[in-house]
Amino acid sequence: LSRIGDELYLEHTESGLSLRAVNSSRSGFASFLFAPLFFQLYEPGTAGPETELFRCKVHMKSFLGIFRSLPSLEKSVGKCLILLKPRASRLVLQLHCKYGVTKTHNLAFQECERLQAVFDTQSCASHLCAPARLLAEAVVHFPLTLAEVTLGTGPGGKISLRNYVEDEAEPSKTMVTELWLAEDEFQSVAVAPGSHITFCLKEFRGLLSFAEASNLPLTIHFDEPGRPVIFTLDDTVLEVHLVLATLSDLESDSQSPSTNGVSHLPAPSEDFADDLESYMAAMETGEGGSERPPSPTFSLRPRRPAESDPEEEEEGAVPGTPPHKKFRSLFFGSVMTPGRPGPATTQEVLAEDSEGES
Amino acid sequence: SLDNARHLSSLLRAVHFQDHATCLATASGLRVTVEDAKCIQANAFIQAEIFQEFSVQEESVMFRINLSVLLDCLTIFGTSSLPGTSTALRMCYNGYGYPLILFLEEGGVVTVCKINTQEPDELLDFDFCSTKVVNKIILQSEGLREAFAELDMTSEVLQITMSPDKPYFRLSTFGNAGSAHLDYPRDSDLMEAFHCNQTQTNRYKISLLKPSTKALALSCKVSIRTDAQGFLSLQYMIRNEDGQICFVEYYCCPDENITEAEL
């Protein structure tokens, strides 16, 4: 999860403890849902009609700092207790280690809104399921610095992986790596022929290493370019989802390039978060909703003016550069599509981004 | 002279948190002292018995020397310890004003180093003696090593609580992410001795204590003592490659900015 975002959202629901993260440009979202069975003891605490079920967010680094050294953890820690102390505003993580030693960490947390990406695996046209090892061996061929990769379906049911190259890059100077996987290497293949999607490899690598370590098969659900790709891992006690925005295929683009995923939204202001909450509450279909969720290109049109204000106030924030790379922000709110009026398109690009990581 | 210079260099490294050190040589051995901020003092003791040859003409000889340079010379043949190879050392000091001369030999290659010595500074006297100790515990270093290596350095202080009641022995930090407490119960297997008479909570500047992690890493046991004023004494028992025992101790005064402990 730390490959995705800087903050870890914790929420417990009837179905278990959910850990989630979203990246700064809202183009990547991941959630790990641990069923109550995963835990030795799972006490959600009573939630009355007024009180909401617990959720909070903490700084990813602080949380990770507690679990710093995995090998020694495995050897020395017997059990870990997670408690929430709302009155003290502390999330308590207590590690019971050998020799009777107890490590107690009291982390400051922030209250937050529910972080939920709207997606539906059922509505995707293509599905692939492969052992994690297969994909891990495939991505090893791509350099660690590679930002995006294109997954495609080819003749004979073969699946291809190829590094994504900027249109503007010099063809003679770029190296293109392409590899093909046969259909029978996958556990299941149900793909629309001729389809392809381009997504951020870096964010995917994080999930891939987890899948490899836990020896779980990875399922990829995708659709047309521009629609998000959903990676899932399923286990009896754990459900993992990684949702990444994909490059859309629009040809005409008059504006100068910028990196993918550069947010045209600054860190959401409080107003925005409230708007988002009401919006999300209205739109929430959850995972596997029955109806097809709306295309992520809707926007909170009436909210737009309010949104632009915080954008202008923030000095250090990257000004809203229109998404030239055509990555669409996932469902969290207004997404710019070319042609749609909005503050971002009218803002001049104050700082042109060089090719780089989102 | 010393057959294996590593016996000396590893100990000195355990107290090397400042460039300069004061060396005191007496008939019983060598003591190297490093201080900082008038709050912390570390001493490395290398008894005469560790050396193959050890003779001091006067009653005691004291000088100040650049510890970084001394360590660089002692490890001039490299720091990796290949089995079977060791650097032999001979140290000579002619008296006040003379440089410290080191002869180092490994595999037939001899190096001569001359390090200038300086006037020794006055050393802090913490006046910490066994009779004034209020609380004392002896722990196996294994239990503390990881804890010290992972201390939250965003915390300005390390708070140490010692008590006959719970939590018995607790190390706390208060950093950016929140507070963290490490509790060692009195009946833990790691606890070799537990003599706490009074509940004491003291805070020490974490930046001053962090260097003691080196000594902790080398040691097999550590004794932690505090006196009525909250002065802290950490004594590390270090066993070298030949099974000989040396000691390193750290003295630290409590952080005076804090008047009340936050538990």
Image (tube, helix red, strand yellow):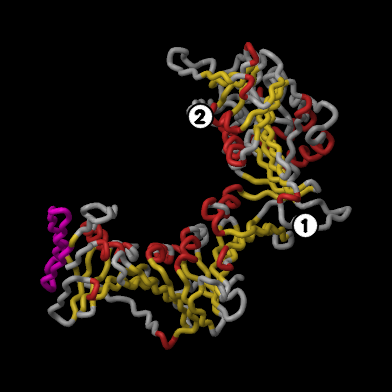
Residue A106 visible (yes or no): no
Residue plotted at (59% across, 55% down): B177
Q: Is residue A172 magenta?
A: no
Amino acid tagged 1: Glu
Q: Decide: is A247 above or below B213.
A: above
For the residues carrying marks 1 and 2, which lies nearer the camera in this image? Answer: 2
Q: Decide: is B223 above or below A284.
A: below
Q: Is residue B184 found left or right of A331 in the rendered image?
A: left
Q: Circle 2 marks a residue in which chain?
A: A
Along the line of sight, which residue is nearer the eye, B85 or B165? B85
Q: Decide: is B246 above or below A237.
A: below
Helix, strand or loop at mark 2: loop
Residue B202 visible (yes or no): yes
Q: Tell me which corner region of the image, top left, top right, bottom left or bottom right, holds residue B244.
A: bottom left
Q: Residue A79 placed where, x, y %?
A: 64, 59
Bounds of the magenta segment: B89-116
Magenta-highlighted stretch: main secondary structure? strand
Residue furthest right as drawn: A49
Helix, strand or loop at mark 1: loop
